[in-house]
Image (cartoon, rainbow, N blue to C red):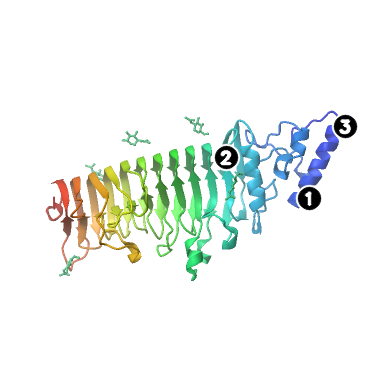
Amino acid sequence: MALSSNTPSLRVLFFLAMVVYAAHAGKAAPKEKGKEKSGGSAAAPEAASPEAASLEGATVSGGSSDISKAGAKGDGKMDSTKAVNEAWAAACGKDGAQTLTIPKGDYLTGPLNFTGPCKGSVTIQLDGNLLGSTDLGQYKSNSWIQIEHVDNLVITGKGTLDGQGKQVWKCDKKYYCKILPNSLVLSYVNNGTVSGITLLNSKFFHMNVFQCKDITIKDVTITAPGDSPNTDGIHMGDSSKVTITGTTIGTGDDCISIGPGSTGINITGVTCGPGHGISVGSLGRYKDEKDVTNINVKDCTLTKTSNGVRIKSYEDAASTLTASKIHYENIAMDDVANPVIIDMKYCPNKICTSKGASKVTIKDVTFKNITGTSSTPEAVSLLCSDKLPCSGVTLDGVKVEFKGTNNKTMAVCNNAKGTATGCLKELACL
Ligand SMILES: *[C@@H]1O[C@H](CO)[C@@H](O)[C@H](O)[C@H]1NC(C)=O
Ligand SMILES: *[C@@H]1O[C@H](CO)[C@@H](O)[C@H](O)[C@H]1NC(C)=O
Ligand SMILES: *[C@@H]1O[C@H](CO)[C@@H](O)[C@H](O)[C@H]1NC(C)=O
Ligand SMILES: *[C@@H]1O[C@H](CO)[C@@H](O)[C@H](O)[C@H]1NC(C)=O
Ligand SMILES: *[C@@H]1O[C@H](CO)[C@@H](O)[C@H](O)[C@H]1NC(C)=O
């Protein structure tokens, strides 16, 4: 702690501050003294100004943004919500490059509200694990970790965000099922990177990227059982320039879902399975949905998923939008149920009628070099609407074969216009 107060009054102030902090943190403050060096982080205190002394514990402790120094306890039991939120506020409130450190240990928390704008840029260094409380009453919004209005954000480390969903997936009351929180939500974040971390057993989606721009998700691992409900890996919507690379996802729902308003999305080197595949959609369910365009999915592997690469929209769509320039290339399928599918009659759990006229236009879609095996005979399904056919669909080198022996590989193409080249002849339905 670089505190050198020359005047007695400042020293007294500092002492008082440490007493306040100690009481707040529930542990002896003096022990912390002198071991606060964590270079370049928000830990480096400027000075014990009177202003600092009037602030909350985390700040007063010398500006440390190490959650354990703000009173968080890595025993997996004590509720560290307040300490973590305060450590964030401290890091976010300072100029320059700040680091919020989650050291090794298991830190149990309820909702974390990481709201900006921040004065500088914050890196969340996740060395330890955060455990999401299973007390659903604590969650007022549908997020566990909500990062909002923060620019130049970095989340990195080898730690885990454990949603502890196992304990709430079996909720029998619909009310609770509905409000299950997403694990990591980025909204209104510009220029953000999430790398290296693991997300485990979210209660609902593992990651939700909403109203963001310039987001990179890299070398992330997302894991939940194949039968866990609504545990999508990464969902995005109303966002542009999102890149996902080198990421391994196995969950109970879509590995990645690209919702309305997504533009300029590049997904490469993603391994998916178990799960429902890499999907654009669903589209048309809600009012005022925006177009989806410039989507590139390349060099991905899907294993034992219920869909491979999919575009899904509601037939009785509530909004009018266009999904275009969607490009799937070099995708390896292993035992996938619906490897290539456009489904304009998407209607899960019969929550919709199938009588409406679709208002979702799907055009300029390429499936190139899609290989491997299908667990059902129908390796290609282009199920477009008779009132609004799909156009500009290209099947180029689609060679996915039915794995079984009791039937043959086939394609079902309804109301789809385009071209097929270099495909298995059974699949050249255009
Ligand atoms: C999160 O914090 C911001 C600002 O500190 C506040 O305006 C907002 O209401 C908080 N959100 C929740 C869900 O508590
Ligand atoms: C994006 O954020 C990173 C990390 O804070 C920062 O180093 C970089 O300069 C930012 N890029 C832009 C264009 O602002
Ligand atoms: C996505 O890939 C395309 C084609 O390779 C490229 O032109 C575009 O700049 C990339 N977008 C981002 C956000 O990296
Ligand atoms: C087709 O995709 C596979 C990966 O799925 C890749 O190994 C192969 O090189 C690609 N073929 C061509 C011609 O690009
Ligand atoms: C082959 O698969 C198709 C599509 O799933 C199905 O309609 C058909 O009945 C199957 N044929 C046999 C002989 O099982």
Contact between marks 2 and 1 (CB within 8 A): the answer is no
Q: Would you name the residue on which mark 1 appears?
A: 23
- Which of the two marks, 2 or 1, is nearer to us in this view? 2
> Does dot 3 land on a helix, a strand or a loop?
helix
Contact between marks 3 and 2 (CB within 8 A): the answer is no
Question: On the picture, is 429 further left or further right than 173?
Answer: left
Q: Would you name the residue on which mark 2 appears?
A: 116
> Does dot 2 land on a helix, a strand or a loop?
loop
Q: Quadrant of residue 240?
A: top left
| Of the image marks 2 and 1, the number of the one nearer the N terminus | 1
Crowding near pointer 2: few (<14 within 10 Å), some, many (20+)? Answer: some
Q: Give the residue type that dot 2 points to.
A: Gly
Place of residue 263 in the rendered image (x, y in percent of width and height, measured from the top left): 35, 40
Check the picture and name the quadrant holding the N terminus: top right
Q: Give the residue type that dot 1 points to.
A: Ala
Distance of label 3 from label 1 (alpha carbons): 23 Å
Q: How many marks?
A: 3
Question: On the picture, is 312 further left or further right than 397?
Answer: right
Q: Nearer the viewer, residue 56 or 130?
A: 56
Distance of label 3 from label 2 (alpha carbons): 36 Å
Q: Would you name the residue on which mark 3 appears?
A: 8
Crowding near pointer 3: few (<14 within 10 Å), some, many (20+)? Answer: few
Question: On the picture, is 308 further left or further right than 76?
Answer: left
| Of the image marks 3 and 2, the number of the one nearer the N terminus | 3
> Does dot 1 land on a helix, a strand or a loop?
helix
Q: Residue at left 24%, top 49%?
A: 370
